[in-house]
Image: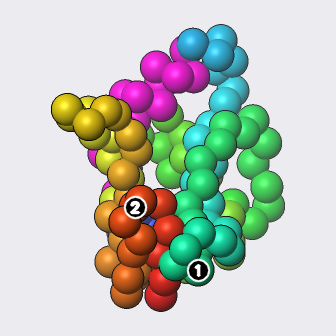
Amino acid sequence: MPPPLIFTDNAAAKVKNLIDEEGNADLKLRVFVQGGGCSGFQYGFTFDDVVNEDDTTMEKNGVSLLIDAMSYQYLMGAEIDYKEDIEGSQFVIKNPNATSTCGCGSSFSV
């Protein structure tokens, strides 16, 4: 079975650095979708040390990623990357399920 989403090496390395800074090796990155933003849905990221019963767990380079059941359907096939360029640094989600996105890049519609 293919992974629900692609978590790039760059993204995993940045998350690992952030977890190391927090000093809590039990932290995992939770990626979620919630209502809001100018296009109807928006992405969210948070650290969590609890795995819920309905979570899908992925691991990449020693970093655990959690996706709740509701968000899973919207994130299936997406790619999470971390980009650093002249405009700054940020996590970027490329989502094939999004029919439109907002200029800010953090909200989308399906």
Which residue matches tag 2? 105
Q: Position of residue 79 (x, y in %)?
A: 34, 59
Q: Which residues are magenta?
A: 6-20
Question: Pointer 2: residues within 10 angstroms few (<14), some, or many (20+)?
Answer: some
Q: Position of residue 64 (x, y in %)?
A: 55, 40
Give the distance between the C-alpha atoms of the residues marked 1 and 2, in whole angstroms: 12 Å
Residue at 65 percent across and 43 percent down: it is: 46
Which amino acid is tagged 2? Answer: Gly
Q: Earlier in the sequence, mark 1 or mark 2?
A: 1
Which residue occupies the foreground of this view, 16 or 33?
A: 33
The answer to whether residue 77 of the structure is visible from this angle is no
Residue at 51 percent across and 51 percent down: it is: 58
Which residue matches tag 1? 40
Q: Is residue 16 above or below residue 47?
A: above
What's the magenta bit mostly, secondary-structure-wise?
A: helix
Q: Position of residue 45 (x, y in %)?
A: 59, 48
Residue at 33 percent across and 40 percent down: it is: 82
Which amino acid is tagged 1? Answer: Gly
**Which quarter of the picture shows residue 42?**
bottom right
Was residue 56 drawn as part of the magenta stretch in this picture? no
Which residue occupies the foreground of this view, 110 or 65?
A: 110
Q: Is residue 66 left or right of residue 98?
A: right
Q: Secondary structure at mark 2?
A: loop
Q: Is residue 24 above or below residue 51?
A: above
Q: Is residue 22 above or below residue 88?
A: above
